[in-house]
Image: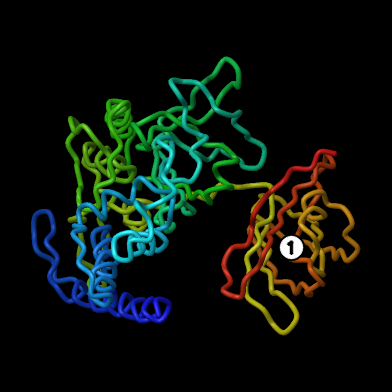
Amino acid sequence: MKSIKRSILLFVLFFGLFVSVFAISTTPVQAESNVVNSTEVIVSYEDVFQSYYDTVILEAKLAFKDTNLSFEEFCDKYYYFDMDIKTYTEAVIDAYVYGEYSDIPIAKSSSSSSSETADYILDNGIFEREPIYNYFDYSVIEIGDIIYETDTIFFDSGHIAMITDYAYDSTYGSYYRTVEAVEPTVSNGFLDDTRMIDYRVKILRVVGASTAQINVVRYFMNYQIGKSYSLNPIRLNTNINSSEWYCSELVYAAYKYANIDIGVKKNSSGNDVYLVLGCLPVDIYNSYNTSEVTIPSFFLEMENMGKSGSYWLIKITNLSSSYISFQYNSKMCFANDAENWSGLNDLVTRSLYPNTSVTVSIRENWFATTVVAGWLDSEDMRFITYGNQLTTSGGIVVTNVKKDES
């Protein structure tokens, strides 16, 4: 019976989201200094939380139960648990409606950020791990560039940080230092290969920002170090003396301090639309005041394009700046063989120019679930990209990239 109710609730939730978005898209949006009649769909943190909270209340009504859980408490509790928003909502229903738990399980550690494991955050200048700079050409990066993590625990809403310095550490040498709002405080971190790969980082640059403005932004960011992390879904602070921040709010405020709005975008009528409640990482990505910077890399990117009969269609892209000859296994293999480039008996050789792609067919194999491609550089170092556990929903399948120096 509960599963039937959940199915009904899922339909109601998506219908409610459709109605909410329709209502938002047909309602005039209050800008900072004027009113814009917008047909642009604008969804804030508050909209997302409200829809899931409404699901809890509806479940309680269907179960003829009363719950005193407020919207504010529902929002606040989320950030203490290591769950996506859908799993969290189901746990809330179990706990508050059916009483199956004394409290919601799986508490987060205090060190987690919007990314699942923030091992790139410095602890009073101490590195938790060594920065790795083997896979990407970072020479195109500039101070003031914005890090946008697209693969994070908060239903992939993302995480935002800013590169503030090209710094030096006596143990690990030069590295790209960041300032970012993470749990529990605004801290320094770093950008490297591991972070780029694990969190599928995009690098954004603020269009037309002068050196003087970047210096103002850096001052603002460094001034916030040590202040508290607090993700309030309806807050958009810009005050330099604020005592708390969340990730995208901090970077938005820093550029606002330098008279650059990195949240503004155009609607379908060509009018400016400004942020009102909250700043999602994707708001910064979609702003016309930011643009994505291509970071050349030395590995192949693999994307799952779906399935055709007994074959998987895999799009392979050469992200390097060189013309390369690469190999892929035309039949699915085991993850251990892919990782170690061993036991591969169905290799096919292809070539690609820089920043070009080819879609290949990879045949299913008994009990094997992995696709793999790799290439050798001039020093016989192999760059291996492989993806495991493919699903027909498509999407990126890269799960690891390995530089094989054996």
Residue 242 is drawn in which quadrant? top left
Q: Residue furthest left?
A: 34
Residue 66 is drawn in which quadrant? bottom left
10 Å neighbourhood of mark 1: few (<14), some, or many (≥20)?
Answer: many
Q: Nearer the viewer, residue 295 or 254?
A: 254
Pinpoint residue 142: horizontal percent, then vertical percent.
Answer: 46, 36
Q: Nearer the viewer, residue 37 or 142?
A: 37
On the image, numbered disc 1 is attached to which residue?
370
Q: What residue is shown at x 32% (from left), y 37% (from top)?
A: 210
Identify the image's colour scheme: rainbow, by chain, secondary structure or one colour: rainbow
Pinpoint residue 121: horizontal percent, then vertical percent.
Answer: 47, 32
SS type, badge 1: strand
Q: Nearer the viewer, residue 272 or 399?
A: 399
Pinpoint residue 372: horizontal percent, then vertical percent.
Answer: 75, 59
Q: Quadrant of the C terminus?
A: top right
Q: Residue furthest top?
A: 170
Q: What residue is shown at x 44% (from left), y 57% (from top)?
A: 156
Name the side, left or right, on which 272 lies relative to 315: left
Q: What residue is shown at x 14% (from left), y 65% (from top)?
A: 29
Name the side, left or right, on which 256 lies relative to 385: left
How many discs appear? 1
Q: Is residue 325 placed above or below 197 in the rendered structure?
A: below
Q: Quadrant of the N terminus?
A: bottom left
Pinpoint residue 203: horizontal percent, then vertical percent.
Answer: 47, 47
Amino acid type indicated by mark 1: Thr
Residue 222 is drawn in which quadrant? top left
Q: Is residue 366 placed above or below 32 in the rendered structure?
A: below
